[in-house]
Image: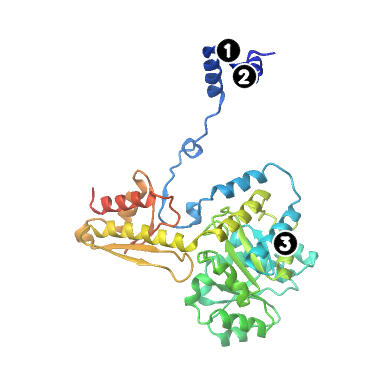
C-alpha cells in the first residue's frame, strides 16, 4: 500500500484517535491535502481572452447573458446521468406549457432554431417522408408572407426549410398574396412599428384564410407578461431566445403554441438524423437548464428588478452629465430589449473625443467595458451587469469623457 493511501486511511480514523496524534502530523496531513487539491482554472485567461463588463445588452456576439447558479446547477446535474432525449423533451415541454399557460412547448436551439423547426412542422405535418424531403419543397406549401418592414436577416431561419419569403406592406396585399402555396404568416415583434398590420389584425387574417401565424419574440423578455401574451392573443406559434432576458443557456430557446405544430416540429430535431434540423441539437443539460431558468425568471420580483435598473441607469447618467457639454437620454425601447437604457451624446468640440473613440477606450481599459452606439451617441444598459459594476461604469464613463 502506498504511503499516501496509508496516510488517507490513517486520517479516516482521526475522529477516534485524533488526540493521540501529534500536531505536526496533523499539520503535515492538512498541508498534503491542500497541495493535492486542484486549483480552479481560469480558462479565458489561459486562452488569452479578455472578459468584460457588459454595458451593452444581450448580444450573441457578446455571449448573451450570464446564467444564475440554479441554472448551472441544473446543467451540471444533467451531465451526471443518461436519459431518453425524446422523453425528456416531452416532460419538459409539458412543464413549460403548464408554467406559461399555453397548449404546448419545446426547448429549441435558440429562437432561430425555433423558427426553422416551427415552419418545417407546419410544412410537413406528421408525414415523416416529407420531413426527410426538406429542403426540397416539391408538393409542399412553401411560401411565407412577411411584412416588408419585418423582413430582416433572421428570415434566413425560414428559408433554411426551402421556403420562399413573400413581402407585402398592407392587409390588402397580404390577402392577395395568399394562395395554395402559402404555408405561414410570420411577424417580427421587434419591428412591430415598422409594419402597417398589427398583432390582432395579423392573427385575424391568418384565421380568416386558415393560415398559421408565427411571431418571433426573441428579445421580448422582459416584460414577463410577453411570455403569456402572444399565445393568448391567438398566434399559433411564438418563439423566445433562452439566453437573453430569461438567462438560460445561450444556445437554447423556446417554441410555444399549438401542440399539433410543435409535435410536428419535433420530428425535424434529434435524435432523428435525416432532417434539416439534425444539427440543431439541444442536449439534456440545456433542456434542464432552460426549464430551471424559466422557473427562476417567473419567480423573480420584476418590479424590484426594474427599480434597480432604473437606479443604475440614473447613476451612470448623472455621472456623465457632470461633464460639461454632455447630454443624456434615459429611454425604454417599446419592443425588444424593453429595459431602462441610456444614450450619451456630446459636442465633440467641447468634450474632445468621438463616440467611436470613447467606446474603444472603454473596451481597451481596465476593466474592459462593452457598450453600443453609433457616430451620434454611446448606448448603455445595466441589466446584464453584475451588482456593483454600474459604479465602475459610471466612473469610467466620466473619466473617458474628461479625457483622464
* Between discs 3 and 2, the one toward the N terminus: 2
Find disc 1 in the rendering and name its residue.
21
Residue 72 picture location, percent across and down: 58, 47
Number of marks in the rendered image: 3
The colour scheme of the drawn protein is rainbow
Q: Residue at x 55, y 13 (%)?
A: 25
Q: Nearest the camera: 366 or 3?
A: 3
Tell me whether circle 1 and circle 2 mark residues in contact (CB < 8 Å): yes
- Image mark for residue 14: 2
Instruction: Estimate the spatial distance between the alpha carbons at disc 1 and disc 2, rounded to whole Å.
Output: 8 Å
Q: Secondary structure at mark 1?
A: loop
Residue 332 to residue 211: above or below: above
Is residue 225 visible in this depiction of the protein? yes
Residue 206 to residue 15: above or below: below
Find disc 3 in the rendering and name its residue.
266
Q: Tell me the quarter of the picture where residue 273 sits.
A: bottom right
Is residue 273 visible in this depiction of the protein? no
Q: Secondary structure at mark 2?
A: helix
Residue mark closest to the camera, 3 vs 1: 1
Q: Secondary structure at mark 3?
A: helix
Is the N terminus in the top left, top right, bottom left or bottom right quadrant? top right
Amino acid at each position: 500500500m502506498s504511503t499516501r493511501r496509508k496516510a488517507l486511511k490513517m486520517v479516516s480514523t482521526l475522529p477516534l484517535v485524533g488526540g493521540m496524534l501529534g500536531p505536526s502530523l496533523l499539520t503535515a496531513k492538512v498541508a498534503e491535502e491542500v497541495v493535492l487539491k486542484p486549483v480552479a482554472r481560469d480558462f479565458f485567461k489561459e486562452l488569452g481572452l479578455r472578459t468584460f463588463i457588459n454595458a451593452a445588452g444581450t448580444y450573441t456576439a457578446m455571449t448573451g447573458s450570464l446564467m444564475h447558479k440554479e441554472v448551472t446547477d441544473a446543467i451540471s446535474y444533467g451531465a451526471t446521468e443518461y436519459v431518453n432525449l425524446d422523453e425528456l423533451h416531452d416532460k419538459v415541454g409539458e412543464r413549460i406549457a403548464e408554467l406559461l399557460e399555453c397548449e404546448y412547448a419545446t426547448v429549441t436551439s435558440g429562437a432561430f432554431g425555433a423558427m426553422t423547426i416551427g415552419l418545417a412542422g407546419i410544412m410537413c405535418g406528421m408525414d415523416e417522408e416529407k420531413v426527410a424531403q426538406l429542403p426540397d419543397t416539391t408538393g409542399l406549401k412553401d411560401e411565407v408572407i412577411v411584412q416588408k418592414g419585418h423582413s430582416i436577416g433572421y428570415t434566413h431561419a425560414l428559408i433554411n426549410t426551402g421556403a420562399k419569403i413573400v413581402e407585402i406592406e398592407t392587409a390588402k396585399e397580404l390577402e392577395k398574396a395568399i394562395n395554395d402555396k402559402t404555408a405561414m404568416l410570420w411577424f417580427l415583434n421587434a419591428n412591430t412599428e415598422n409594419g402597417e398590420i398589427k398583432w390582432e389584425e395579423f392573427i385575424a387574417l391568418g384565421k380568416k384564410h386558415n393560415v398559421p401565424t408565427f411571431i418571433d419574440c426573441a428579445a421580448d423578455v422582459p416584460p414577463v407578461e410577453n411570455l403569456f401574451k402572444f399565445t393568448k392573443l391567438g398566434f399559433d406559434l411564438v418563439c423566445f431566445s433562452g439566453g437573453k432576458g430569461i438567462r438560460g443557456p445561450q444556445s437554447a430557446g423556446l417554441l410555444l403554441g399549438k401542440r399539433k405544430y410543435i409535435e410536428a416540429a419535433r420530428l425535424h430535431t434529434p435524435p432523428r438524423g435525416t432532417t434539416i434540423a439534425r444539427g440543431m441539437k439541444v442536449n439534456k443539460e440545456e433542456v434542464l437548464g432552460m426549464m430551471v431558468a424559466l422557473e427562476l425568471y417567473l419567480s423573480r420580483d420584476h418590479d424590484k428588478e426594474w427599480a434597480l435598473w432604473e437606479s443604475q441607469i440614473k447613476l451612470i447618467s448623472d455621472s456623465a452629465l457632470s461633464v460639461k457639454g454632455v447630454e443624456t437620454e434615459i429611454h425604454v425601447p417599446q419592443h425588444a430589449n424593453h429595459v431602462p437604457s441610456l444614450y450619451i451624446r456630446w459636442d465633440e468640440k467641447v468634450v474632445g473625443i468621438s463616440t467611436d473613440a470613447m467606446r474603444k477606450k472603454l473596451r481597451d481599459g481596465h476593466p474592459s467595458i462593452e457598450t453600443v452606439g453609433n457616430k451620434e451617441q454611446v448606448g448603455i444598459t445595466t441589466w446584464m451587469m453584475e451588482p456593483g459594476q454600474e459604479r465602475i461604469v459610471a466612473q469610467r464613463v466620466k473619466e473617458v469623457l474628461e479625457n483622464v
